[in-house]
Image: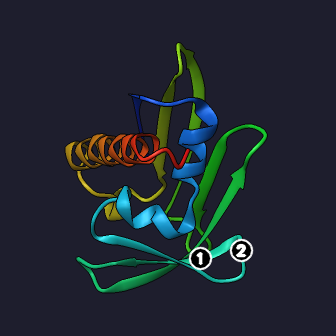
Amino acid sequence: MSEHERSHTMPAPPQTVFDQAGDLDGLDHWLPQDLHVRPEILPDVTVHEDSTGQDAHARLQTDPERLRIEWGTRDDGRYAGWLQVADSGDGTSKVTIHLSFFDDDHAPADDDIDRTLDESLRRLADQVRLRTDTGTA
C-alpha cells in the first residue's frame, strides 16, 4: 500500500475552490491529463485512462458541508482518494489531495504520483484564478 498527499494554496475562498474542484464538467481541466471522468448515475462514474485505454468503474462523492470530495474504484479496490478544501484566511484556501493505492504492483512510481498531484493542484489553482478573474465565482 502506498499513501500520497500534497497541498496547495488557492487564490479564492473555500466555497469557490470547492465548487470548481467538484464541477463534473470541469474535472478534465485539473485532473491528470490522461484521466477522464464520465458520470453515470452518481455517485457512480467511469474513469478512462488514455495511457492504457482502460475504463475503471469508480465512485465520486461530494460533501458540500465539509468541502470534501472522495473517490475510489468500485470493482477492484485499487485506489481511493479525497480532496479537502480549508479556509486559509485572507480570502485564500488550502487544498489537500490524498491518494491511497492498495496494490503496490499496480501503483505508479511514487515520484510520478507526487509530480502528478502537484501538477493537478496547480491546474486547479489556474482554473480557480480563471473563475475569479472572470467574475463567475
Foreground of the two, 92 or 8: 92
In the picture of the structure, the residue carrying the numbered disc 2 is 42
Residue 10 in percent (x, y) is at 43, 31
How busy is the neighbourhood of tag 2: few (under 14 within 10 Å), some, or many (20 plus)?
few
- Picture residue at 60% right of the left edge, 49% below the top: 19
Q: Please tell me which residue lies in front, 123 or 101.
A: 123
Tell me which amino acid carries mark 1: Val
Q: Residue furthest top?
A: 90
Measure how far apart labels 1 and 2 are at the Cα level.
7 Å
Question: Measured from the top left, where is residue 8 in percent x and y?
Answer: 39, 29
> What secondary structure is found at the residue carrying circle 1?
strand
- Relative to 68, is 55 on the left or the right? left
Q: Residue at x 79, y 40 (%)?
A: 65
Say what amino acid the circle numbered 2 marks: Leu
Expressed as whole percent of the image width and height from the top left, the position of residue 89 reads 56, 13
Residue at 64% across, 38% down: 15
Classed neighbour count for the residue bearing mark 1: other residues with Cα under 10 Å, few (<14), some (14–19), many (≥20): many
